[in-house]
Each structure stands twice: as structure tokens, then as C-alpha cells.
Image (cartoon, rainbow, N blue to C red):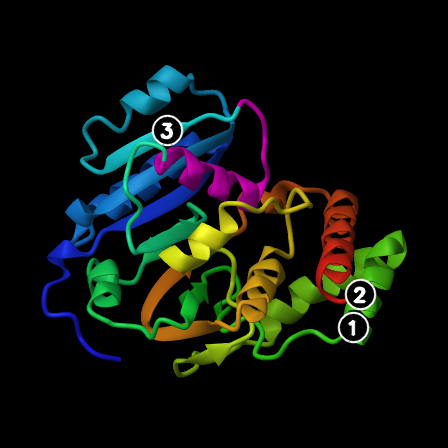
Amino acid sequence: MLEITDNSKIKLLNIVLLYSNEEEVIEYAKKLCSQSISDNISLIIVINKAGDMTEENFKDSFKEIGIKTYFYNPGRNLGYLNGLIYGYNQYVKMHESPEWIVMSNTDISFSDNSFFEKFCNKKYNDDIWLIGPSIYSLENKSYDNPQYKQRHTLKSLNKRIFIFKNPLLSYYYLKMANIKAKFKKKEKQESQYSYSVHGSFFFVNLNFMEVLKTKEYGPLMYSEEAYLAEIVRLNNKKCYYESDIEVIHTASTVTGKLEIKKRARYIQESLEYIKKEFYI
């Protein structure tokens, strides 16, 4: 990896979703504005679901923040990945796309104000389509990247589908997963290639985005990481975990509100979609 001598020319597009969390999105925009190269960052907000704040008041909140912001309202909840793709497609109708697109949650903080500058100071090989930073989970006091180093086997996929089809099994599985995450800490790892990276914050290069923009993800949510990893794999490209830059993930503020029964159904449907699209 070679250093770029002039990162003032590097432009970044950060796409996020609004889902009844106006204050969190506003705070995230303020964090972007504190970045050393904030002038190079444009923020896209896709309104999947408005909360108590009116859309007019919400947009007015960004006038003094100082980050270039674009708002797009599809009129319905498109889900996580489809919402992000929608935001990109709306943006490029009127603007040129930058080299890198950031897709992220808004329950994110940055380890320092040079996070994006550090990223832009790196040059990645053309075959790297998807990059995930180090992600520290504040809730679990553990690291979430790289998410998976190896591709799931069909056997492991079928096992998880079976679990999430069964309400009792899925209940205890999710409960145990939460307990395991709190007690079995993952240490920070060195940079490396991986099968997938965590979906709360990741970089997509322009070539990958041009492929993604024509696709529609079947499920409403969950298993987006596997979907992205499979498209990367099928195009003979690579996914990379970058340990030199780090974000702090506060919590799953949207999906965490879902009751376990509904969450299990969404997970089951997403896994069956992955199986159908990429395994059989």
C-alpha cells in the first residue's frame, strides 16, 4: 500500500439512513464535520421512516453543521442495504460519484478526527472492492472486524436456517449469542483479507458501487454482509479489513428495538435468500 501525497483531491460520500432517529443522525453529522478533511465529505441521508421531528425542522438542523448534506425520501422503508443503494442512485443523477462510498449506521463515533484522512492516505489495490475498519463494540467491549474470515458452508447455513425457523430455538440462540458476545471478547487483529466485514460501517469502491446500484437486495434487513461478500467473490475481487483506522459502534439502535420473534423471522428470511442466490 502506497501513500497518496495529496488527499485534498480525494472525495468521500457517506450514506446513512434515517429511521425515527433524527437526533442520532444530527449528532453523526456533527462528528463528520469534526473530521480533518470534512470539506471532502458529502453526507447523504435516506429517510426510511421519519420520527417525531418534522422533515422541515430536521433538514433545518443541518444548516449550521457545515457538512454538505443531501436528503432523499423514497416514501417508504426500503430496508438497510436497499436504502443505502437508493441514496447513491439518487445522488449520481445530479453529481459525479467519488472514488469511495461509505455506508454506515449513525450510532458510530470515530477514534480520532483524522479517521478519514488516514483512510485517504492509503492506496489500495484495484481488486479490493470492500473495506471494513476496526470496529470496537462499546456495548460488548470487543472488536467486530473482520466479521468472517472464511465463506459459510452450505451445512452451516442450513443449520442456522433451521434454528431461526424454530421460535424456541431461535429465542435461546439469540439470547446465548448476546451473552457470548459480552463474555467472549474478540481482540483487535492485524489488517488482513477476509470473507466479510461488519455492516455497521464499511467502504465500497466505485467499481463495486456501479455493480451494486443495479441490484436489489431481497430481504428487508440482515445478512447484508454475506450478500456483499458474495458479489465481491463472484467478481473475483477481495474484501479487506483495515486495522489502522477505527470506529466505535455504540449499539444497534434500530434493530435492537425489534422483538426476538420478529428478528428471528427476518434473519431466517435473509439466510434463505443468501442460500437461494449463492449456494443452490
Quarter holding residue 90: top left
Q: Residue sitting at 37 percent across and 53 percent down?
A: 102
Query: What kind of residue is marked 2?
Result: Ile
- Find residue 154 and name its label: 1
Q: Residue sitting at 12 percent across and 56 percent down?
A: 8
Q: Is residue 65 left or right of residue 179?
A: left
Please say whether residue 91 is one of the residues in the magenta stretch: yes
Q: Judging from the image, what secondary structure is the residue with disc 3 in? A: strand
Instruction: Assess disc 2: are there few (<14), some (14-19) or many (≥20) residues with their C-alpha within 10 Å of its C-alpha.
Output: few
Query: What span is in magenta?
Result: 75-92
Q: Judging from the image, what secondary structure is the residue with disc 2 in? A: loop
CA–CA distance between discs 3 and 1? 40 Å
From the viewer's perspective, is residue 33 above or below residue 46?
below
**Depth check: 236 or 75 in front?**
236
Query: What kind of residue is marked 1?
Result: Leu
Res. 34 visible in picture: yes
Residue corresponding to mark 2:
280
Asked if the residues shown at circle 3 and circle 1 are in contact, with their CB atoms under 8 angstroms apart, the answer is no
Magenta-colored segment: predominant secondary structure: helix
Res. 205 visible in picture: no
Mark 1 or mark 2: whose residue is earlier in sequence: 1
Mark 2 or mark 3: whose residue is earlier in sequence: 3
